[in-house]
Amino acid sequence: MLDKIIAKAKKCRAFEVSTYNQIVNKNIKIPVYLSAGQEMISSTISTYCEKLEIKPLIFGQHRGHSIYLNFGGDPIKLIDELLGLKTGCAKGMGGSASIHCPEINMFGHDGLMGSNIPIGVGACFASKKPTIVFAGDAAAEEDYALAAYGWAATKNIPILFVIEDNNLSILTDKKTRRSWDIDNVSRSMGIESFNITDDPEEILNSIQNYKLDKPRLLNINTNRLFWHSGAGKDGDPKDLLKNQDISNDLEYFEELWKSRLGKL
Amino acid sequence: MEITLRETIKHTVANHLNNGFLAFGQCLTAVGWVGGTLPEMYEDQGMIELSMADVAGGAFVVGAGLMQRKPIYVIRYQGFNWYNSVSIINYACKSKELWDKPCPIFIRSIAMEGSIGPVAGSSHHSLYYRMPGVKIYSPMTSNEYKQCYNDFMNSDDVFYVSEHRGSYSNDKELEDIVFFNPDCILFPISITRFAAVEASKILLEQHGIKVSVYHQKILKPYQLNPQALHYLSKCNLGIVIDDDYEDGIASNIAHKLMINSNSKVFAMGLKNKSAGFANHLDNLPPSSVEICSFIKRILKNKRKV
């Protein structure tokens, strides 16, 4: 399983690097939120879901390219989305931040940080389908997000909250914003909660024997490689893919970009 | 005896749940069952008690809408929409246009007045009005409510249904009052429709002033009534009356009527101040007496001119 997780993560990294290159070359005209550095999280969770043969409802927000790709989204449709084309996964309306894809049960995001958390809870409650919500550490501390963990616990619904915690909201660190940890809060509400790193083995340990049949929260410490549109990097990230060769995947995506740009 | 609006709403909700759809709200099963407008049903039958987290509660309902459970969302006081509406307006109302994913929700938003302070009092349908992707109805009779619900069930849109507790005991339909040569035309919304009818009656009986009344039931999308426009352009005086602040739907509809009839149309609604709890500090919708005074004053000035 680990090989598959890393292979998927490498593909995502290659996609993001190729997208970064398009930003630098000014081929993309909209704000782009890259998920490079965080790929291991969704690659691990999605691979685990495949093993369980579960196709969950997915509620992500910005920085969700890897979520989309890892759960089976078509990279061509994502490229088209970033180019604002009607053939994009959200017909050009969603852009980078609001990826929507019915084929993989991924629901678009409206731009209010963390709104996907209570909306995902409501969808899970109403459908009783396994649901995964991805959010950053800033979105996860929204007041309505906290209320959503509480209601998910009260109703004991099959939902997994995945907090991609890079310790930053733009550039404001966590300790400046709050004196508490999400996993402690959700644990106090009765949700099984874990505070771990994005090492895939650690993630797998935290969901071992978990069938996505009740609420669980993973606060996963990670790093993002690029800021919003690649203007800078987060400190000195512990890059789990640093020693991986992504050249083949990168070449593939560079060609894909070239062919889509050629159609403009 | 005709059925009251209260009973109609109660039956509507019961049928909705019996058909496998959901209703959400806070304190639904408490004493009174929201003014007697809810059937005595519980979570296993689809009546879902939310926590008291208003902002999140609205978003839970949006999630249920995305799953096509056609949720009815009961908001006990319209002013609570300042919290409850966030995800409805920003997600549910946009979802169809953005992602081709309808998120139908039937918002039962309930107004009332009288010593209930600055937030709970009156209607707040104007909160939703400026945003795309929402339909706004304000039914005050049983047939209007049935029509509203049927329209919802035949569509995949978000419906904001501006109710008023003052209408729940109403068991009569409200017909437009049409004069062929009116002195003034009223376009009342929500609970002010009853006051407008009363004002029309008083002015005719006591002063011989002919005041037509065109009831405003669907506020968005707003359909201009060709007959009303015709008479409006003849009498050159109209008033849109609302249970919300003047600087909202009332002014907007007045503007639409003015540019389409080339007539003078005023807006009357809540005064531009916060309501206090004490009687003398309250902010109530225009009463029949106030409407009569306003019309007489304008007609007097008009005749002077």
Image: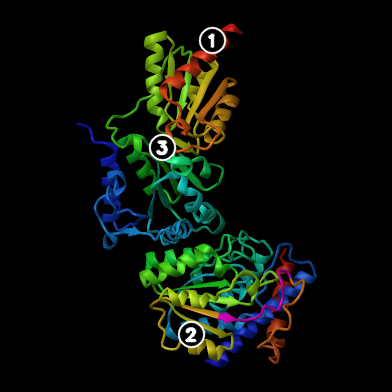
Query: Which residue is at the front of the view, B299 or B97?
Result: B299
Residue at (70%, 92%) from the top-left corner?
A: A243
Query: Chain under label 2?
Result: A
Q: Secondary structure at mark 1?
A: helix
Mark 3, residue position: B115
The alpha-carbon separation of the residues under discs 3 and 2 comes to 57 Å
Mark 2, residue position: A48
Is residue A160 shown above or below B52? below
Residue at (67%, 78%) from the top-left corner?
A: A224
Label the magenta part by its dominant secondary structure.
loop
Q: Amino acid at mark 1?
A: Lys
Task: Give the quarter of the image for residue A80.
Answer: bottom right
Q: Secondary structure at mark 2?
A: helix
Q: Quadrant of the C terminus of chain B?
A: top right
Tag nearer the camera, 1 or 2:
1
Query: Chain under label 1?
Result: B
Residue at (61%, 84%) from the top-left corner?
A: A9
Name the mark on residue B300: 1
x, y percentage for residue B257?
55, 26
Query: Which residue is at the front of the view, A123 or A105?
Result: A123
Tag nearer the camera, 3 or 2:
3
Q: Amino acid at mark 3?
A: Ser
Q: Which residues are magenta?
A: A220-229
